[in-house]
Amino acid sequence: MSAVTVERLEHVHVVTLSRPTVRNAVDRETAEALHTAFLAFEDDKDARVAVFHGAHGHFCSGWDLQHGARLAASGDDQTLSGLDFDVDDARAMGPMGPSRLRLRKPVIAAVSGAAVAGGMELALWCDLRLMEADAYFGIYCRRFGVPLIDGGTVRLPRLIGMGHAMDLILTGRKVEAPEALQMGLANRVVPTGTVREAAITLAQQLAAFPQATMRADRESAYAQWDLPLGEALQQEWQRGRERIPDALEGAVRFSAGHGRHGRF
């Protein structure tokens, strides 16, 4: 069975990681398969939202340390250190696979069980994170001297603030679902055994919205980091004004009685 499978549910792609013997840890071959799967999602004109899911009760336990031990024994240190990339390359592969991709479409992480070390970095790469009640995050690689090289030191502080991020980065401690929700690391917590279906339902809701406007707003939110306020507002306007015809079409629908009183 392939370590990475893709299920297409109309406009939603479900990318599933499945390496049960190592709690979905990622080796080089699996990283390449994940990278390929999300590039295919990006390039598919019918695909609107992806769900990133780990099979067999775990999201991902990080980089495959058994694989790393074999690399160490063989003297091969280029498998990871050779993954330098051009900052302008939005399709570059990271050590864990898709972590350097800058997609135009949203991805939802469906987190069950462990999402630790590089697996936590993959969840941080996603736009939204849904967690099962007994799932957990943690930078467990702290114990073994494995660095965060898939965006963890960048995305985590931006998501939850430097204080919380330093706590997790320095200690490597376990973060269970209630605390993850409280600090903004998780967007929603759902009952155990339901996260895949919950993520698909949310993805279908996002896929039903006018896509060009949603993507413009999403891109603006990412692009505004580190821009002065005036430049950030300017780039928001430049993206948004292209969608004014969509807004006028939406106004017509509203005037006809659609979507009133908070209905979606």
Image (cartoon, helix red, strand yellow):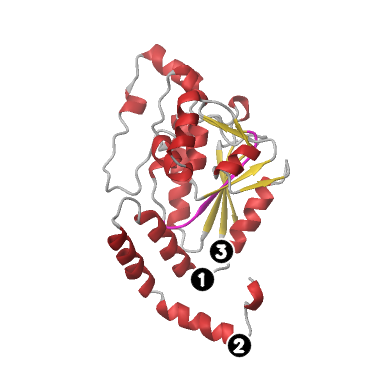
**Bounds of the magenta span?**
104-113
Q: Along the polypeptide, which appears first: circle 3 or circle 2?
A: 3
Whether residue 111 is visible = yes
Q: Is residue 12 left or right of residue 63?
A: right
Q: Secondary structure at mark 1?
A: loop
Q: Give the residue pinned by disc 3.
A: 207
- Separation (CA) of disc 3 from disc 2: 22 Å
Report the disc number at residue 210.
1
Packing grade of label 1 (10 A; few <14, some 14-19, many >=20) is few
Q: Give the residue pinned by disc 2.
A: 256
Location of residue 42 with respect to 214 vertically, above or below = above
- Separation (CA) of disc 3 from disc 1: 8 Å
Which amino acid does the dot numbered 3 rest on? Ala
Q: Secondary structure at mark 3?
A: helix
Location of residue 163 with respect to 110 vertically, above or below = above
Marks 2 and 1: CB-CB under 8 Å?
no
Which one is in front in this view, the residue at disc 2 or the one at disc 1? 2
